[in-house]
Structure formats: structure tokens, C-alpha cells
């Protein structure tokens, strides 16, 4: 499936949900916010939110500091 992830065109291997995409990218779901086609996806919906060919996904990491 072809997705645009953080502005870069990517071919994702057999991913159907946000959870599967994060796992494929080796990203910890609890440490990021995800937006698909300009809509924020709630964390409790990651496992059921279906991705489609051509979706634009933005993944933002939380950064702590002081």
C-alpha cells in the first residue's frame, strides 16, 4: 500500500490499521500522536482505524525535556 508518511511517499507492507503501521515502523504507539488525512486518530482507535491507498499520515513523537 502506498502512503505518504510525514511528507515522504512510502510503500507499507501489508498494513491495514494504524497499529499495524506503527508496528511495521517499529514505533511505540503510546509515545506518538497520529493524524490521517488531516484528522487526528484517537489512541483507542489505532487498532481499528483502517488505512487506505494514498492516505497521508503524520506521526508526531512526544518529546520531554526541561
Image (cartoon, grey):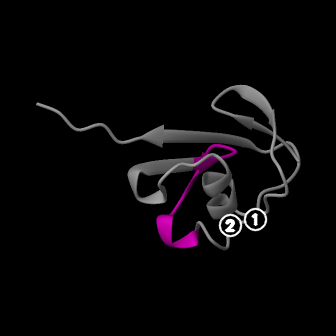
On the image, numbered disc 2 is attached to which residue? 49
Residue 52, position in %: x, y?
A: 84, 55
User: Which residue is most to the left?
Assistant: 66
In front here: 38 or 16?
16
Magenta range: 35-45
Residue 63, position in %: x, y?
A: 30, 37
63 horizontally vs 65: left or right: right
Element type where label 2 sits in the image: loop
| Residue density around tag 2, few if under 14, some if 14–19, many if 20 or more, within 10 Å | some
Report the quarter where the C terminus lies.
Answer: top left
Q: Residue at x 63, y 31 (%)?
A: 6
User: Residue 28: which numbered mark, if any?
Assistant: none
Residue 30, position in %: x, y?
A: 41, 59
Q: Is residue 28 above or below residue 58?
A: below
Q: Residue at x 57, y 71 (%)?
A: 45
Element type where label 1 sits in the image: loop
Q: Residue at x 79, y 63 (%)?
A: 16
Q: Is residue 17 above or below residue 27?
A: below
Q: Is residue 8 above or below residue 23?
A: above
User: Is 37 included in the stretch rendered in magenta?
Assistant: yes
Q: Residue at x 55, y 41 (%)?
A: 59
On the image, numbered disc 1 is attached to which residue? 50
62 horizontally vs 19: left or right: left
Q: Is residue 62 above or below residue 42?
A: above
Residue 12, position in %: x, y?
A: 80, 45
| Residue density around tag 1, few if under 14, some if 14–19, many if 20 or more, within 10 Å | some
Q: How many marks?
A: 2
Mark 2 to mark 1 CA distance (whole Å): 4 Å
Q: Are marks 2 and 1 in contact (CB under 8 Å)?
A: yes
User: Is 5 included in the stretch rendered in magenta?
Assistant: no
Amino acid at each position: 500500500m502506498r502512503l505518504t508518511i510525514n511528507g515522504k511517499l512510502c510503500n507499507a507492507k501489508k498494513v491495514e490499521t494504524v497499529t499495524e503501521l506503527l508496528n511495521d515502523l517499529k514505533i511505540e504507539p503510546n509515545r506518538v500522536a497520529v493524524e490521517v488525512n488531516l484528522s487526528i486518530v484517537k489512541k483507542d482507535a489505532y487498532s481499528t482505524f483502517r488505512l487506505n491507498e494514498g492516505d497521508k499520515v503524520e506521526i508526531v513523537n512526544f518529546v520531554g525535556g526541561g
